[in-house]
Amino acid sequence: MEPSVLAGRRVIELGTMLAAPFASHILSQLGAEVIKVEPPRGDPTRSLVRGGPSGTFIAYSHGKKSVCIDLADPEGHAAFCQLLATADVFVHNLAPKAARKLRLTRADCEAVNPALVYCHIRGYATGPQADDLASNPVAEASTGVMEANRVNGRPSRLGPSYHDQFAGAYAVIGILAALLEGKKDGRGAREVEVGLYETGLHVASRDLAGVQLKQQLLGRPEREPHGEFSMPGYGAYATADERWMYLLILNDAHWQKFCEAMGLPQATDASLATLRRRKKAREQVEEIVKSAMAARSFDDVAARLKAGGVGCTEVMPIERVLEAPQARQPGTLRPVRYRGLDFDVPEFPRSGAAQAPTDTLPPPELGAHTVALLQAAGVTASACERLLARGAIAAANPDDFAWAPVRQEA
């Protein structure tokens, strides 16, 4: 088996919640050794569900090792620096003020390890808001996403923390670029800086450019219509048995195929043959599609659309997503066992995952690798004992939590 692309690289993650842990998760899936450094209380995702770890921790921390250090303790900080000296990459999402307080800025880390790739995922990149705090919903609110996503008229977050994950993915791109670049010009630590706000701007760039286009063409700001509403027949529709099917009717050929597959008279109706005409008759088209879907069972609709070459998929409830045959293909899911429970965790999508899977570890217990990794980095056994005794570092405690059982109704 060929070694993974990042085999032999050591990544130290100092991350909470999602952005930095997601970045190091991808690096782990690419073969890097990832050491998750956590404070005495652990990453907050360790205690979000009934007293124990959440899906975030299980999904994005398997394959990692855990070192528990109190970085506010001078001796704990010194031990961390010895570990940092052995790393190729350091990725964190501390607030800028916290990074300065803990002496973990780029300059601080460069003094410890001049060859380091230093990656900071922060709320805002350099600028007037550089020290402001931001989270995934803040990025959505400040870049136009939330204002357009309303629940009962109230601007609301999307749900999944996509901006955190985008920022983590952008960080990986920057880290890989820095590793490829090497130290050609003799610089010190190579810096990768990713702002959550700037990530949100980039993700929204299509819509932001669209508003500017309309301003210049029409002389007034006008938003691009939402993709679903600009294309009649493009969206989710309920079948007779109250299941939902998402239709991809994007162009004239799609419309023709849909009408033929569903046996509709509109298949020969020239008045609706072009997208421009269907847009003008939006309500009529929507009613045609809605009625056609509601008149048949889901299985009947699915068979007809598949036979007719119409793009579609069921709108899946989350509890059924992994039942799909496509999800069960080799290399798509990884079995992960944690505290007696079994999980199927989606893999990072990469070519050859089925033929050459990367090794993994179960999600680590807090501090499971503290002593071994610190000693390997040069911290003596007696120093580790002293640090353990004073609480500057911690080792794994298998009794640190127990998921609270669900109470059965009498």
Image (cartoon, grey):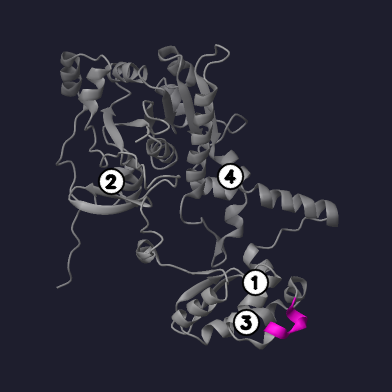
Lower position in the chain sequence, tag 3 or tag 1: 1
Question: How many angstroms separate mark 3 from mark 1 (CA)?
Answer: 10 Å
Q: Amino acid at mark 4?
A: Gly
Q: What residue is shown at x 59% (from left), y 39% (from top)?
A: 198
Distance (Cα) linking label 4 and label 2:
28 Å
Q: Which dot marks residue 254?
A: 1
Determine if the magenta segment contains residue 272: yes
Name which of mark 4 and mark 3 comes first in the sequence: 4
Position of 290 relative to 155 (above/below): below
Rendered location of residue 370, percent (x, y): 23, 27
Q: Is residue 410 above or below residue 70?
A: below
Magenta stretch: dominant SS?
A: helix
- Give the numbered dot on residue 47: 2
Spot occupied by residue 185 in the image (x, y as percentages of width and height): 58, 13
| Residue type of the residue flagged with mark 3 | Glu
The range drawn in magenta is: 267-273
Task: Identify the residue at horizontal 58%, vertical 80% (top origin).
Answer: 261
* Residue at mark 4 to residue at mark 3: CA–CA distance: 41 Å
Q: Which mark is residue 200?
A: 4
Q: Which mark is residue 260?
A: 3
